Image (cartoon, rainbow, N blue to C red):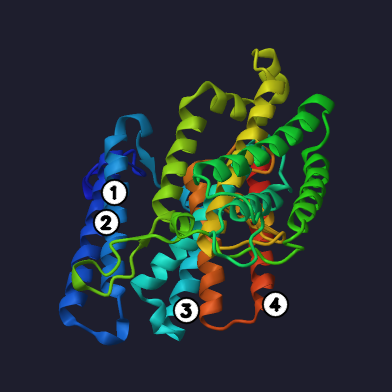
Amino acid sequence: MSSESEVPGMQKGNTISRATYAVYFFIAAAVLVVLGIVLTIANIKAIYDLPVIVIGIGVIVAFYALSQYMRRDSLGDVTISSKTAKTFLTNNAIILALLVLVVIICIKERKFMQVRVVLDILTQSSTKLIIALGICFTLLIAGTDLSAGRMVGLASVISCSMLQTATYANRFFPDLPQVPIILPVALSILACMMFGGLNGFLVAKYDMHPFIATLATQVIIYGACSLYFDMPPNNSQPIGGVRPDFALLGQFKFAEKAFGTKFPGISILVPIALIVLVVIWFVLNKTVFGKNVYAIGGNREAAVVSGVNVFRTTMGIFILAGGLYGFAGVLEGARTAGATNNYGNGYELDAIAACVVGGVSLNGGIGKVGGILSGVLIFTVIQYGLQFINVSPMWQQVIKGIIIAVAVAIDLAKYRKK
């Protein structure tokens, strides 16, 4: 009997139609949902919220299957072979390792299998995702941005300093009236966009390497932020006493204790981050600007010949990135209800690492928004999970460093093959 008759939808022995591929995932999703329902009925207290999590994973798999089925004509058939299996394992090695790590954590500490933990991870990932989406633009043109973290801190300090309650004893501006929230938020984002414009000008006008240009800007931003933070009467004291309406921007939760349940609620940061994600996806995939970004990263000389305005695009990249860092900084200030001049320190390194783990090539021209999302989630799960089981912070840094090294090695290996 031929292989075509053994497996429905098989063609040429090792190729299945995209529709059949989607059906397999629909079946997997159904199995997960049924398993979750069975575990719910069993009411095993030792596994906490695992049934709900399993059902949630089943729903996600179902959406993936639906997307594959809807795009079956454009995506074409799926080839199954030892080569494609090896490619899949190589491209997803870190994700698979993460799944193993999650299983180990769940075995060691069963409380990790709670909806609250999942929601905490999503909340912590939100601002990190916005920063990573900003930095991905610079990576897509084979550059980088070392000033991202300091811009986050600058935006936090500016916004919090102008949005303190009137009765707070140590107000940054004692005589400042209660201004509308939009004003300090806009000023914070504009300040970061100005520094982003400085980055872009140094890179585009003088062909300065982004590493050096953004390193210089990083130092300038930190110095300027520290001078602002040290202004009397604050004198470098941590900024606190932020207005409740501003704090809600980072602390409000949807459906908290809904219908009398103990549901912890979904942080407002999660839908905000998802909206930013969708907007950036649209910019990169559906606009001329996004196509120019990929063109410059893929082949700068060819982009110039094709009529791409490299100067304008590069300026736009760094200004847009600065705006995203500023927005993330405002959200961080609201989430923590305070700020210091050291806010955001090192955030750019985590964002770069998340992008690389998510498939953004350091050689430019390659990277998807979905991959960045997965990269941010991977790093947040690792950090949260290791803290959950009380792993030493020093060992956490070692593990993160190994992951970054492996991710870059895989990226370079794929680039050499191409």
Label 2 vs label 1: CA separation?
6 Å
- Name the amino acid, label 2: Val
Q: Are marks 3 and 2 in contact (CB under 8 Å)?
A: no
Query: Tag 4 or tag 2, which sits nearer the N-term?
Result: 2
Nearer mark to the viewer, of 3 and 4: 4
Query: Tag 1 or tag 4, which sits nearer the N-term?
Result: 1
Which residue corresponds to mark 4?
A: 394
Nearer mark to the viewer, of 3 and 2: 2
Q: Position of residue 256 (x, y in %)?
A: 30, 66
Q: Are marks 3 and 1 in contact (CB under 8 Å)?
A: no
362 to 31, vertically: above or below = above
Nearer mark to the viewer, of 4 and 1: 4
Residue at 44% x, 55% y: name it.
245
Which residue corresponds to mark 1?
A: 63
Q: Are marks 3 and 4 in contact (CB under 8 Å)?
A: no
11 to 41, vertically: above or below = above
Which residue corresponds to mark 3?
A: 104
Q: Position of residue 371 (x, y in %)?
A: 50, 48
Q: Are marks 2 and 1 in contact (CB under 8 Å)?
A: yes
Residue at 65% x, 37% y: name it.
193
171 to 81, vertically: above or below = below
Label 3 vs label 4: CA separation?
19 Å
- Name the amino acid, label 3: Ile
- Name the amino acid, label 4: Met
Q: Position of residue 175 (x, y in %)?
A: 63, 52
- Label 1 Cα neighbours within 10 Å, binned few <14 / some 14-19 / many ≥20: some
Label 4 vs label 1: CA separation?
39 Å
Per the rendering, the mark at residue 59 is: 2
Query: Tag 1 or tag 3, which sits nearer the N-term?
Result: 1
